[in-house]
Image: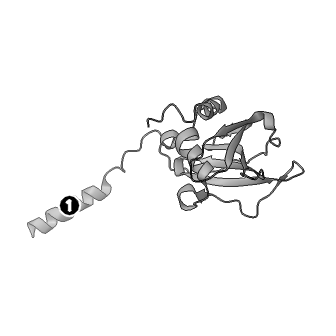
Amino acid sequence: MKRTLALICVLFLMACAKPAFKDEFESDKPWVEQLTQLPAYPDVKNLMAFDAGSATSNQYFVDTTSIKIGEDGVIRFSLVIKSSEGALNISYEGIRCATKERKLYALGRNDKTWSQPRVSEWQKLDFVRQFYAQRELSKNIFCPHQQIVSSPEEAIQALKAGMHPRIFR
């Protein structure tokens, strides 16, 4: 009987204890995505190439003037993919470093305007095989250790180097 009473007291005290410690980076606030403004259509003179791996023969570029770091923890940029036949796919995208997700905001058209995609929602980079470029940008250039770069200039330096300096290969 005494053991049962002691166990009940211990469980009661545990229930009354303070919640687990939260560091300065944790928050009870839900994440809110900020509104996105589309950049100017990419100009060839602003494109910087990067290597997305050997799984594809496409060429990959980021428009350096389009790189924006949002207060919501999302890095947004224009991505240009050139196929081996010369076809271009142009998109305006965002990567949420903390969750390894990507979102498509707009698609480039031949008349150098943006169009709204049919689907514009956050997608896990690990689950879609074709996200070669986005995975490379997330893992090794824009989001080392799932931490967003601090500025567009830092992102451009990482693109030039082919990897972020915080990456230790």
Q: Residue furthest left?
A: 2
Here the colouring is one colour
User: Which quarter of the rendering shows the N terminus?
Assistant: bottom left
Whether residue 30 appears in this view of the structure is no
The foreground one among 66 and 160 is 160
The foreground one among 122 and 136 is 136
In the rendered structure, the answer to whether residue 10 lies left or right of residue 70 reads left
Q: Residues within 10 Å of mark 1 (few under 14, many from 20)?
A: few
User: Which quarter of the rendering shows the C terminus?
Assistant: top left
Q: Which residue is mark 1?
A: 9
Residue drawn at (53%, 47%), measured in percent from left and top?
98
Q: Is residue 142 above or below residue 96?
A: above
Q: Position of residue 45 (x, y in %)?
A: 79, 33
The foreground one among 165 and 124 is 165
Whether residue 67 appears in this view of the structure is yes
Q: Residue furthest right?
A: 111
Q: Position of residue 47 (x, y in %)?
A: 74, 37
Q: Secondary structure at mark 1?
A: helix
Q: Is residue 103 above or below residue 144?
A: below
Q: Position of residue 2 (x, y in %)?
A: 9, 66
Identify the image quadrant of residue 10. Answer: bottom left
Q: Position of residue 105 (x, y in %)?
A: 73, 53
